[in-house]
Amino acid sequence: MNDSGTPASAPGQGRGLRHILFPFEGEDRFLAGALSFVEGALGADEAVVVAVSDPHEELIRQALADTGTADRVSFLDTAELSRNPGRLIPVWQAWIEKASREGRPVRAISENPWAGRTSAESTELRYQEWLLNRAFADAPIWWLLCPFDTVADAAGTTLAALERTHPLVLRDAGPTTGSAYTDEPYAFEPLTDPCDPDEALAFTAGQLASVRDRITVCAGRHALAGDRLRDLLLAATEVAANSIKYAGGGTLRTWAEETRFVCEFRDSGHIADPMAGLVRPTVGQVGGRGLWLAQQMCDLVQIRSSAENGTTVRLAMEGVNGG
């Protein structure tokens, strides 16, 4: 970031995401870094989008009100970005497309809530942070500043993981190349073991009704019902149909962990595209909607796929009694 608050672009690169990690300690440091970023964008007449916690949003709004520029900044509800990490990329894609139509670069701040997340949620959010770099490699140039409160990370483990997913890190003197960043294939953490799963149900063509019936019965044992169950059934049907179409069938397991009901699908197929389910289907697109729909319907979607081990898709829905 230069003296005007404008992030520096890498030499010879005119496209793609400038993904900046912003570790901070204390509200004063947060506000100084965020305001420098926003004011630099406003000075360049760029579109500015801010998605931060409520207390931090209030700090930024008040500071901008004092300078009369609050109406030039768009604020997003962080709930739109944080509920399911699989919706992170599509939200930013929509903003980039909108700004491109207006001929304006985008500068955004995205503060993901890390406290209170389950291990599975944190794992997927770290992956989505890494995947942002690939998702926008060919997009019009834009900047994304990701504040992270180091006070809540006493062991430094989350910060270390985030440093591996951000090419740039904002320090006191400005953004510098992140020494820990890696563009190697993502090293997934193993999925957790199922919690007392129901007996596996093998399914193949013509057995989608059996899949839905099994999920309905098992979900009923844990008080998942109504709209939440209907959304899960819709997502599960799409995933099971993909297993049938591309692998001839698969197996279903279900269980409850704490307040979530989980459906796991396994088959011998391979999903080669890491962006599967993360890009909004086009109007005329044939196929490719199943995983996208699952991301929109469920509270968490975990996908692990390789040519050697096949594919596992876990769908999780909040709303069970944990019994």
Image (spheres, rainbow, N blue to C red):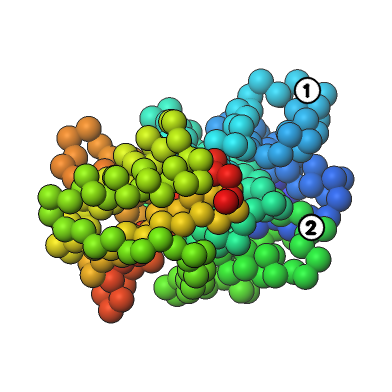
Q: Secondary structure at mark 2?
A: helix
Total numbered labels placed on residues in the image: 2
Q: Image point 45% across, 53% down: which residue?
A: 262
Q: CA distance from mark 2 to mark 1?
A: 29 Å
Q: Is 94 situated left or right of 23 in this image?
A: left
Q: Residue furthest bottom?
A: 308
Q: Image point 66% across, 20% down: which residue?
A: 71
130 vs 293: above or below: below
**Closer to the camera in the image, 174 or 194:** 194
299 vs 73: above or below: below
N-terminal-most mark, 2 or 1: 1
At label 1, counting other C-alpha atoms closer than 10 Å, the crowd grade (few under 14, some 14-19, many 20 or more) is: few
Q: In this figure, which residue is indicated by the disc labeled 1?
A: 65
Q: Secondary structure at mark 1?
A: helix
State the image quarter where residue 216 is shown: top left
258 vs 87: above or below: below
Q: In this figure, which residue is indicated by the disc labeled 2?
A: 152
**Closer to the camera in the image, 26 or 38:** 26
- Name the kind of residue labelled 2 in the image: Ala
The x, y position of residue 222, in whole percent, is 51, 46
Q: Is residue 115 visible?
A: yes
The x, y position of residue 110, in whole percent, is 62, 44
The x, y position of residue 63, in whole percent, is 81, 30
Q: Image point 69% across, 43% down: which residue?
A: 37
